[in-house]
Image: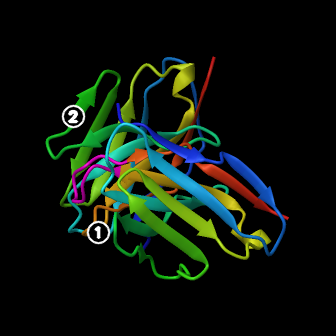
């Protein structure tokens, strides 16, 4: 089983749509969870951390289910500028190194 | 916010040459820096973890003699790809954190795209 698994997509959605991404991780000892966004040929940028109680930042909502080792990201009212690859990221080691999923590609169309 | 720079942003070199990539934290002291590699349509793969003043810790499968890492100061880490070959062509990204541990945010550099002919 891969350490962090994501549906690669692509997800092609119209503007204004709601889209959900899922991710599973294999290391039950992981303590930190994140969603990063990566634009084509650019470095990843932190979108939001994911907390056990779930958290929301504007149009973005993240959920964590530790029992199922499952993380989700919900994007409401999609904008054209949301088009990117969304990376599910989990901390994996004692030195704080991060383990990245392959990412889910989102394309928002007018 | 914390800014990390990388230089060069892209490089093309001949097979057999060595290439040095610099990673700098511009407005904070980075006790730990990480080096990643990303092949097309693949996830970022951690190559090594570098702590200032000590030897880097390499991930399994990464040759330490081929990918030389130096973290001589709290604001600079370098990755040297020695005797580069076409299969080393990739996107190399560094990140830095203000201290080790599990919860500190990592700040990423803009990446260096290496093409080996």
Q: Which of A77 and B71 is in front in this view?
A: B71
Residue A88 belongs to magenta span: no
> Is B103 placed left or right of A11 in the picture?
left
Residue shown at 60% from the left, 43% from the top: A10
Which stretch appears magenta?
B97-106
Residue B99 belongs to magenta span: yes
Element at badge 1? Answer: loop
Residue A82 numbered mark, or none: none
Quadrant where the N terminus of chain B sits is top left
Using the rendered view, name the quadrant where residue B48 is placed.
Answer: bottom left
Q: Where is residue A41 in the image (x, y as percent from the top left)?
A: 64, 43
Q: Nearer the viewer, mark 1 or mark 2?
A: 1
Using the rendered view, name the quadrant where residue A96 is placed.
Answer: bottom left
Q: Which colour assignment does the render follow? A: rainbow
> In the rendered picture of this protein, how many numbered marks are placed on residues?
2
Q: Where is residue A28 in the image (x, y as percent from the top left)?
A: 23, 68
Q: Does residue A12 lie above or below B38 as drawn?
A: above
Q: Nearer the viewer, residue B101 or B31?
A: B31
Bin the neighbour count of mark 1 within 10 Å (Cα to Cα): few under 14, some 14-19, many 20 and up: some
Q: Mark 2 points at which residue?
A: A55
């Amino acid at each position: 089983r891969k350490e962090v698994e994501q549906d690669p997509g692509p997800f092609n959605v119209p503007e204004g749509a709601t889209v959900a991404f899922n991710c599973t991780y294999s290391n039950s000892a992981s303590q930190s969870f994140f969603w990063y966004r990566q634009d084509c040929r650019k470095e990843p940028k932190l979108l939001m951390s994911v907390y056990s109680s779930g958290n929301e930042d504007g149009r973005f909502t993240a959920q964590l289910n530790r029992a199922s080792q499952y993380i989700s990201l919900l994007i409401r009212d999609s904008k054209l500028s949301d088009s990117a690859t969304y990376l599910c990221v989990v901390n994996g080691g004692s030195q704080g190194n991060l383990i990245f999923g392959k990412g889910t590609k989102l394309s928002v169309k007018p | 916010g914390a800014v990390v720079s990388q230089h060069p942003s892209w490089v093309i070199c001949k097979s057999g040459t060595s290439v040095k990539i610099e990673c700098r934290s511009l407005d904070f002291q980075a006790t730990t820096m990480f080096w990643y590699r990303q092949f097309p349509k693949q996830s970022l793969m951690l190559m090594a973890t570098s702590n200032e003043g000590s030897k880097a810790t390499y991930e399994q499968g990464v040759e330490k003699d081929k990918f030389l890492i130096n973290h001589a100061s709290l604001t600079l880490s370098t990755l040297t790809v020695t005797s580069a070959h076409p299969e080393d062509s990739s996107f190399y990204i560094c990140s830095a954190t203000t201290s080790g541990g599990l919860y500190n945010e990592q700040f990423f550099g803009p990446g260096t795209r290496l093409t080996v002919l």
